[in-house]
Amino acid sequence: MIVKLPVSTEWLLHCATSLAQLEPGTTASAAQLADYYDLPAPYLAKQLQALVKAGILAATTGPRGGFRLARAASEITMLQIVEAVDGASMPYECREIRRQGRGALPPEDCRSICVLAAKMADAHRAWRASLAGVSLADVLAELPAYAPERTRSRLTSRA
């Protein structure tokens, strides 16, 4: 199943993964994250607030303020991040076109869910289960060994 998500979902998955690579207690500002990925800072800051609202990130204010994970990377799943940005609704909506046009089925043949809608729902559940089974810690475990130090040095340097 191909699910088309907004570009901000990619941004937030990457930002959360980058924040997970920082030393405990270290924060990165929206401006630092935007600079790190060459993204528009005001829009990214707004999107990051969705992760704060969902309890995925914590935000602090002040000159050394910024964002950090609100809980351990092992407790944050990719599904939680995706749902914080995009919600949990299924992307496929059956409009019952099997009841329309020259090929319209009689009402008695449409008492149960459309087989196509059922298959799409199955695929959506499988997609969600797959994302729910992957934590940020799992993602970090698959990064190259050099990645966390590179991320820490480039993301938190205050140029």
Image (cartoon, grey):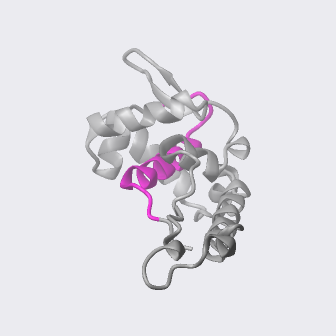
Q: Which residues are magenta?
A: 4-27
Pick the quarter of the image with the C terminus.
Answer: top left
Is 69 within the magenta?
A: no
Query: Residue 10 is drawn in which quadrant?
Result: bottom left
Q: Is residue 47 left or right of residue 80?
A: left
Query: Residue 48 is drawn in which quadrant?
Result: top left
Query: Residue 102 is drawn in which quadrant?
Result: bottom left
Q: Nearer the viewer, residue 133 or 94?
A: 94
Q: Is residue 120 left or right of residue 27?
A: right
Is 25 within the magenta?
A: yes
Q: Position of residue 11 (x, y in %)?
A: 41, 50
Q: Nearer the viewer, residue 59 or 106?
A: 106
Q: Position of residue 87 (x, y in %)?
A: 54, 45
Tell me what residue is drawn at x 40 percent, y 38 percent: 47
Compared with 109, 145 (above or below) is above
Tell me what residue is drawn at x 61 percent, y 52 percent: 78
Tell me what residue is drawn at x 57 percent, y 74 percent: 1
Q: Is residue 107 left or right of residue 2?
A: right
Q: Position of residue 101 (x, y in %)?
A: 42, 79
Compared with 106, 146 (above or below) is above
Tell me what residue is drawn at x 52 percent, y 35 percent: 51
Q: Give the residue furthest to the top.
A: 62
Compared with 61, 18 (above or below) is below
